[in-house]
Amino acid sequence: MGDALRVSLLTTGITLLLTVTLVTPVAWLLARFDFPGKPVLETLLDLPIVLPPVVAGVGLLLTFGRGGLLGPALELAGIQLAFSTAAVVLAQLFVSAPFYLRTARAGFQAVNRDAEDAARTDGASDGQVFRLITWPLAFPFLLEGLVLAWARALGEFGATILFAGSLQGQTRTVTLAIYAALESDLAPALVLSAVMVLVAFGLLLLVRSVAGRRERAAG
């Protein structure tokens, strides 16, 4: 149980860091600019939300696995993603990032452009406007998106077991540990399941609290 919790906390923490770093600029671009093919791109980025996790795992395996599309190039570079801790992170990122993307995009769209323009008129650079105006105003949305993304990453199962396997201490997360425990001893599975229920309840409560504060601030 301890190894599974450690792997879950480590991988979901890395996943959140990558989500903020990689997805925030994309969300801002989608919220602020129109360009040819934008609806198609938005649909592709939202696809993992409705895609069965098992299908996502197959796609990741066919892309990054040893015999996959990018497998030979990665092998030449000495990189093996499949059935590693990095594969857990990649699977979590694939299925959870769209939840952050959707709320972050909504957050950037909700920011008052007049406040940004006033700051630019006073001499603020684009970087200062984003750091001092855009980011703070959009932060409640971003926080809500991060909570949802972390919850989705923590509960990920299908893509992980196909792409990363269930290696104890390396790729076996809490959800995979529950599945493994069901095959041998029901008691640990019940304990882990209870922990997941409590965590899920706490995360939903946090999301509702953030959304409530956001609505009160907007009103």
Image (cartoon, rainbow, N blue to C red):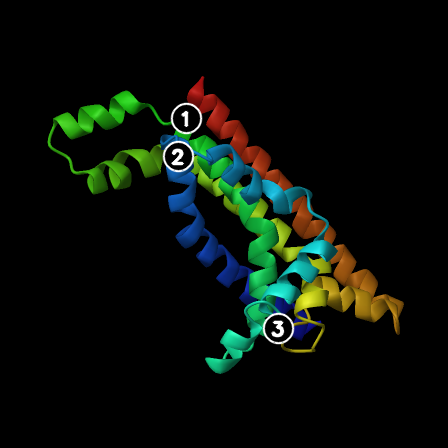
Question: Which residue of the protein is positioned furthest toward the top in this rendering?
Answer: 219
User: Residue 10 in the image: x percent, y percent?
Assistant: 54, 67
Q: Is residue 76 left or right of residue 156?
A: left
Which marked residue is nearer to the observer: mark 2 or mark 3? Answer: 3
Decide: marks 1, 2 in contact (CB < 8 A)?
yes
Determine whether the residue tagged by mark 1 lies in a helix, strand or loop.
Answer: helix
Which quarter of the rendering shows the C terminus?
top left
Q: Is residue 158 left or right of residue 146?
A: right
**Residue shown at 49%/23% (left/top)?**
215
Residue denoted by label 3:
82
Indicate the quadrant where residue 43 lies. Answer: top right
Mark 3 burial class by Cα count in 10 Å: few <14, some 14-19, many 20+: many
Residue denoted by label 1:
110
- Dot 3 or dot 1, earlier in sequence: 3
Closer to us: 202 or 174: 174
Regarding residue 108, the answer to whether it shows in the image is: no
**Image height check: is 170 above or below 88?**
below
User: Residue 22 in the image: x percent, y percent?
Assistant: 42, 53
Residue denoted by label 2:
138
**Residue shown at 68%/42% (left/top)?**
50
Give how far apart the Cα atoms at labels 3 and 1 are.
39 Å
Determine whether the residue tagged by mark 2 lies in a helix, strand or loop.
Answer: helix
The amino acid beneath tag 3 is: Ala
Give how far apart the Cα atoms at labels 1 and 2 are.
7 Å
Indicate the quadrant where residue 205 lies. Answer: top right
Which quarter of the rendering shows the N terminus?
bottom right
Question: Which residue of the protein is positioned furthest toward the left in this rendering?
Answer: 123
**Residue shown at 50%/40% (left/top)?**
41
Determine whether the residue tagged by mark 3 lies in a helix, strand or loop.
Answer: loop
- Dot 2 or dot 3, earlier in sequence: 3
The amino acid beneath tag 2 is: Ala
